[in-house]
Amino acid sequence: MKLLITGVCGFVGSALVESLLQQIEGLSICGIDNLMRPGSEINRSRMRELGVEFIHGDIRSASDFEGLPKVDWVIDAAANPSVLAGIDGHGTSRQLLEHNLTGAVHVFEYCKRHEAGLILLSSSRVYSIAGLASLPLRDNGLAFELDTCRPLPTGVTACGIGPCFSTQAPVSLYGGTKLACEVLALEYGEAFGFPVWVDRCGVMAGAGQFGTADQGIFAFWVNSHLRRRRLNYLGFDGEGKQVRDALSPRDLAALLGRQLRSGRAGGRRIYTAGGGPANAMSLRQLNAWCDARFGIHQPSSELRPRPYDIPWIVMDNSAAQIDFDWRPECRIDDILCEISEHARQHPDWLERSGV
């Protein structure tokens, strides 16, 4: 099998390379990356060591696809991953569309031309902001948690948010680009006869992640706490009770490997993939984890929330478990320990991440 990974020098793309090469015998990988993300150059030499055929190119440029070899499958892991993209002053809304939507169309055209299957890595942020903000929650003192004693909306269970949850606008500019990509990917696959899987990923986390406050929050928090950098609890009364679940890219690779090997035609094509309830943690709980290992470091509180912020997002993996016998295996404590060890070994990691 020959595989193309876009965004191959990013955290997720590079981690998928290592895991998939271990999983799939005889796998050959080529990858494309524009290396514009701070820190991505670090992974370039590692990809070559692993035998990846690396192409320095930009998926926003159709001509950069002309020299790419024919492959059997594409994993599209290239995107601006920040929910604040296009509104936070780091890039414009037009640039966001060029990165996340125009680039994806070039990927779809490549799949059409070479009859290659496609796995599109999407995001939990395709879901309705109003819907997410109105989920029935209770405060357990340390974190918000789903109140299963109250009626739950369609697409939500005690296990979290599933594929059928509302995607009604607004979902953020970033979420809108990812949702549009999902629709177009499925339409391209139907129109031109190539298989498509869409995986709506929760928060990815692990050693070597380029952490910032608006993406890679677990890596950012651990590195910042260890270095005694300023940390803030933003919004939600400034108490840090907002919750996310953490997914290791090794676990994501296990799901993708099963999708790559699946010959199933028809049926469900969109899945949620996250750490799930067992790997969910609030910022307050994350800070307590760091306090126990690095010493006390108290975040400041800021009542004003960031745009698009949500109190609780945890992914329900039931559909992927039913169809692919998949569930996350990496526990959140192990993920945080890996991040912590990497942070100790790389004291300049936040600077490398562009922080």
Image (cartoon, rainbow, N blue to C red):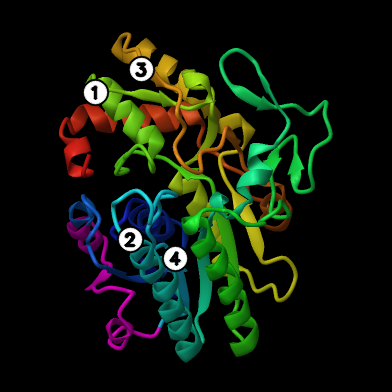
Nearer the observer, 340 or 190: 190
- Give the percent coordinates (x, y) of residue 239: 49, 18
Q: Compared with residue 298, is residue 283 higher up or lower down, i.e. above or below?
A: below
Q: Amino acid at mark 2?
A: Thr
Q: Amino acid at mark 1?
A: Arg
Per the image, label 2 sits on a secondary structure element best described as: loop
Kind of residue sitting beneath label 3: Pro
Report the Cα–Cα distance between label 2 and label 3: 30 Å
Mark 2: few/some/many CA within 10 Å (<14, 14-19, 20+) = few
Disc with the residue nearer the chain's start (3 vs 4):
4
Tell me which segment is drawn in magenta: 44-70
- Tell which circle, 1 or 2, labels the residue nearer the N-terminal end: 2
Q: Which is nearer the N-term, disc 1 or disc 4?
A: 4
The residue indicated by pointer 3 is 299
Q: Is residue 72 above or below residue 302?
A: below
Q: Between marks 1 and 2, how big is the CA–CA gap?
A: 28 Å
Judging from the image, what secondary structure is the residue with disc 4 in? Answer: loop
Q: Counting residues from the N terminus, which is met first, the one under dot 2 or under dot 4?
A: 4
Q: CA distance from mark 2 to mark 4?
A: 42 Å
- Residue located beneath label 2 in the image: 92
Q: Label 1 belongs to which residue? A: 229
| Badge 1: residue crowd in 10 Å (few <14, some 14–19, many ≥20) | few
**First of labels 2, 3 by sequence position:** 2
Residue at x 41%, y 49% (from the top left corner): 84
Q: Which residue is mark 4?
A: 25
The answer to if 203 sits in the magenta stretch is no
How much space separates mark 3 and mark 4, taking CA atoms?
A: 47 Å
Q: Nearer the viewer, mark 2 or mark 3?
A: 2
